Amino acid sequence: MQALLNTIAAMDLPTDAQRVFHGRGGLHPGCEHWALDAFPPVLLLTSFQPATDDELAAIGAALATRWQQLAPDQPLNWVYQCRFDGQTETRLMAGAVPDPHVVTEAGARYRVHVLKGQNHGLFLDMAEGRRWVRQHVAGRPNFRVLNLFAYTCAFSVVALQAGAKHVVNVDMGHGAIAIGQQNHQLNGITTGASFLPHDIFTTWGKINRAGAYDLVIVDPPSYQKGSFVATKDYARLMRRLPDLLMHGGHALLCLNAPELGVAFLQDQMRELAPELSFVERVANPAVFADVSEERALKVLVYRAADKPLAG
């Protein structure tokens, strides 16, 4: 636990939502089960195995000491969540959590919820993916984007802020899509987005009617029973990409499954969508460094040919 305590002792006052300590990356032996995130003005400590009262007391004391140094005029707000053996327990340890709770990242605002569920409304490890989208769309005012497994539509927000003409957001989670609509409103975005709260695999008709896209973002869960299982369902998406993309369009393929390496995506793409060529792997935020890049979040960029391949 010492690496976590050392990080707390040296951390800066967080302003944007961000990860502070990433034990899951395996670079801090003995701390693999700890993660500390900032959802200002709240700190969220997550443990993937039960923590003792003494451990929580030591971490709480470290947080209080550092907070007194960083922001003596502001209360310390922190939440503890334990995820273990299929169960989740969440506790408010000190202070309070705003309601609504709105955080920022790179100038965009997002609604989050740290007191319920395991997904808090914004995936912090995807920050560089959102930055890539913002930079890729900038200067292309007629850009059309398809955002599959949109969740709370953060990709849509940054694409529209960068000047995209239209973004189609598809996610079967009605609650997530509703928060996504709120996220657009939080950022003053009133046009350019459409929202389809449907199962992607039964919605291809509506998706295709909107025409071909300049950018298709695919960010599915690695395993969600009854919805998506990467090992069998990702291929179904890959087969669709050539028809969904404009000539010269790009696809952003995301996968957060430690047991599946980069080859899982690349091998299938060569077989199922040979019209698309690999461009790059988007680097993860530095704080999410992992002992194995194969285990870490994978965000791959592919590009469709400028004209159809000769038949």
Image: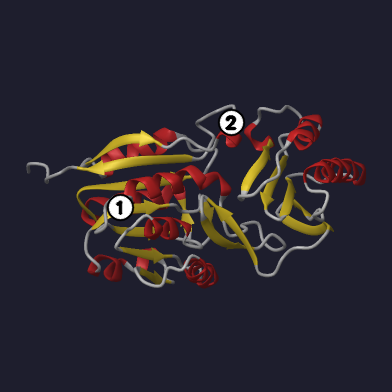
Select label 1 or label 2 by which is in front.
1
Which image quadrant is residue 162 in? bottom left
Position above or below: 79 against 293: below
Question: Quick one: label 1 or label 2, which is nearer the N terminus?
Answer: 1
What percent of the width, then of the height, locates residue 275? Answer: 20, 42
Distance (Cα) linking label 1 and label 2:
28 Å
Q: Amino acid at mark 1?
A: Leu
**Mark 1 residue crowding within 10 angstroms, few (<14) / some (14–19) / many (20+):** many
Q: Residue at x 46, y 45 (%)?
A: 255
> How far across and down, in percent of the image, does residue 100 sit?
66, 69
* Residue 155 left/right relative to 69: left
Tell me the kind of residue under disc 2. Answer: Asp
Q: Which residue is mark 1?
A: 215
| Secondary structure at numbered mark 2 | loop
* The C terminus: image quadrant: top left
Q: Looking at the picture, does residue 245 appear above or below residue 19?
A: below
Circle 2 residues within 10 Å: few <14, some 14–19, many ≥20: some
Identify the residue at the far right of this view.
Answer: 54
Q: Are marks 1 and 2 in contact (CB under 8 Å)?
A: no
